[in-house]
Amino acid sequence: MTQPLRILVIQHDPARADMLTDALRQAGETEVMVLPSDSRLASRIKELGPDLVLIDLANPSRDALEELTLASSPADRPVAMFVDRSDPALTRAAVEAGVSAYVVDGIRPDRIRAVLDAALARFHMFQKLRTELDATRAALEQRKIIDRAKGVLMRARGISEDEAYALMRRAAMERGRKIADVAAAIVTASELLQ
């Protein structure tokens, strides 16, 4: 049995909040929470820990959009934003902030499930890309350290690059460590001896 989707609606107008809550409940099994946009928004979102944040703004300003987007941490969970008017600068700001779905022309109850599904799919796709980017950055950083360590060994022992790499690999195997860890130790020791 799957857990119901926990959706937090940020809306200060009670009538619109009720309409949204009804539409979300009709769209499927969901737990819906409603918060007005107040000054403690970031801490309240953290406390509630929703699976998705839905922000409904009639006419957002850039400041309001940034404040709400930052408070809802689009990197931590999907954020779907509904606005009543189109503004290219606000759309760009929302997308750059990581909003998963930015829907102009307000909410239509019959479309809400499709928008939420799209927001979730887009969020998971970006999470996967972020993870891959972090792994690539870490591998690149390890590669730089290994290259520096090879240079240290080549100068200190008068050996070739291949011999320096083989020496580090053998040391790593004997100690049950990664080559990058051995390389980092060599670079650190070299820096201390200078």
Image (cartoon, rainbow, N blue to C red):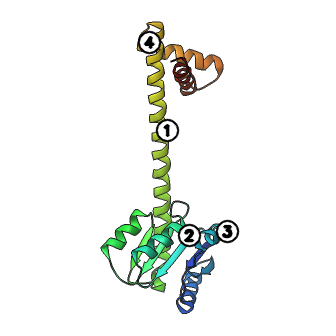
Q: Are marks 4 and 2 in contact (CB under 8 Å)?
A: no
Say few, some or many: other residues with alpha carbon within 10 Å of mark 1 (under 14 / 14 to 19 / 20 or more).
few
Nearest to the eye among marks 4 and 2: give it.
4
Task: Give the Cα separation between the discs numbered 2 and 3.
Answer: 14 Å
Q: Mark 4 or mark 1: which comes first in sequence?
A: 1
On the picture, is 5 further left or further right than 183? right
**For mark 2, what is the residue?**
52
On the picture, is 146 further left or further right than 6? left
**For mark 3, what is the residue?**
47
Q: Mark 2 or mark 1: which comes first in sequence?
A: 2
Nearest to the eye among marks 2 and 3: give it.
3
| Residue ID at (52%, 75%) | 54
Q: In the rendered image, which quarter contains the N terminus?
A: bottom right
Task: Give the Cα separation between the discs numbered 1 and 3.
Answer: 32 Å
**For mark 1, what is the residue?**
138
Residue 108 higher or lower than 171, as above or below: below
Q: Position of residue 168 (x, y in %)?
A: 53, 17
| Residue ID at (50%, 72%) | 68
Q: Amino acid at mark 4?
A: Met
Q: Position of residue 31 (x, y in %)?
A: 64, 77
Q: Mark 4 or mark 3: which comes first in sequence?
A: 3
